[in-house]
Amino acid sequence: MQKLADVRRALGSGELDKGLKGTLCSDLEAGRQRVAGLLDHFQRTFGAGEDTLVALCSAPGRTEICGNHTDHQHGRVLAGAVNLDFLACAALNGTNTIRFQSEGWPMVEVELDTLEPKEEEKESTAALVRGMAAQAAKMGYEVAGFDVYATSQVLPGSGLSSSAACEVLLGVVENHLFCKDELGAVTIAQMGQKAENVYFGKPSGLMDQTASSVGGAVAIDFADPAAPVVRSVSVDLAGLGYALCIIDSGASHADLTSEYAAVPQEMCAVAAYFGKQVLREVDEEQVVDAMPQLRKAVGDRAVLRALHFFADDRRSEQEADALEKGDMETFLALVRASGRSSWELLQDITPAGAVAEQSMAVALTVAERALNGKGACRVHGGGFAGTIQAFVPLSTLEDFRKQVEKSLGEGSCHVLSIRPVGGTVLWS
């Protein structure tokens, strides 16, 4: 921890530039201004003096490259951190209350008199704050009150998992303030998943938090969720002649919790038919052989979603291998296959019963037309709303962006990079 005044001096002298470059901040001057504004807001919001001891922390959003809804079934995924993040200034406040101020949102205050889940906090930032503090306390660390001012480039509903980035950010802060930086990236990810599942009330898998916390491109095998196997994957998309684009469909994730919950529920129903808890424990041929009876027992959509799991589970490893070999032809073919499977089998493009509004389907159609047979696109993340993902040849990138934004609105197409650093303390 360093005095606020010393952080300002380090910012002015360029000492913070190395940390900013590590997060793939392409415009250093804009990055410096962002940090300066963050320090000013922290000071005004919490009445901090120049001698207040603070830490600067960052946690990135994530992009799911393959493995759509496979993680919660203990499957395999390929994901990556991106160069959009939560950036925060944090300090102990000498109280028993955590104060979390995310720019543009109401202040969240969580008293630590109880660390049990609260029903009235479900689906709120307060639930994540309380949940992350609870996980650190359960591991034997003494958690006290602290202040956080955060600014986020990872907008809610963007499909880049703002909730996971927020959880990882809180985990990084608590690891630094209370845990002597002893917690590893995977442990912080697991804390985030528990906070989201138990406190927030969303039955997510572990992919989002792991990708954000670990950083870079990672192939993750969740066969044992308590000890996921994480393999770093060397990726240079630009060197291979492609850009990663995330395209906003214009639809919000709000009020879609039941749609997301139905996916793991139906997959688990298929697993339960065979006496198992998750699909990773089931053999695909068992599902095929039992198709007539299984359809009657769990319904057609559940069966189709199970078949998607098996296929995308395999594709995740195949895509990771193809990327490491620089085999873009194979990689792009697998991306297209994953996209078709998500639309036809997993069915997470359009919420059940939606007719007039089918934003994700429109976005995918627009992107496919703009690609004109080159590159690939697919649903991104949980689906139903938010964003899609496209891998676009650099030679046609500007034309692609213009076509997409003509149909979906200015600013809807974001060109991103895989960030090599996950959740991190930038300066302390």
Image: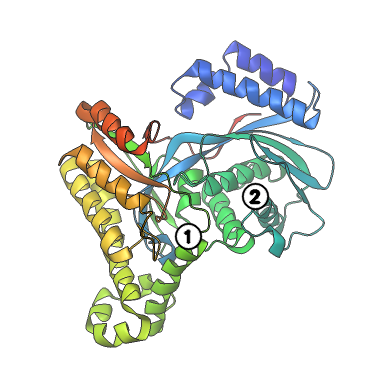
Secondary structure state at the residue bearing disc 2: helix
Question: Residue at (21%, 29%) from the top-left corner?
Answer: 396
Residue 234 against residue 337 in the figure, above or below: above
Q: Three-letter amino acid code at disc 2?
A: Thr
Quadrant position of residue 6? top right
Residue type marked 1: Gly
Horizontal relation, residue 136 to residue 73: left or right: right
Residue 383 position, x and y percent, is 39, 55
Name the quarter where the N terminus is drawn. top right
Q: Nearer the viewer, mark 1 or mark 2?
A: 2
Q: Which residue is mark 1?
A: 205
Image position of 194 (left or right of 390): right
- Give the position of the C terminus as an image quadrant: top right
The image position of residue 225, as x and y in percent, is 48, 63
Badge 1 marks a residue whose secondary structure is: loop
* Residue at 32% in and 36% down: 244
Name the residue beneath numbered marker 2.
125
- Nearest the camera: 53 or 415? 415
Q: Position of residue 343 (x, y in %)?
A: 29, 59
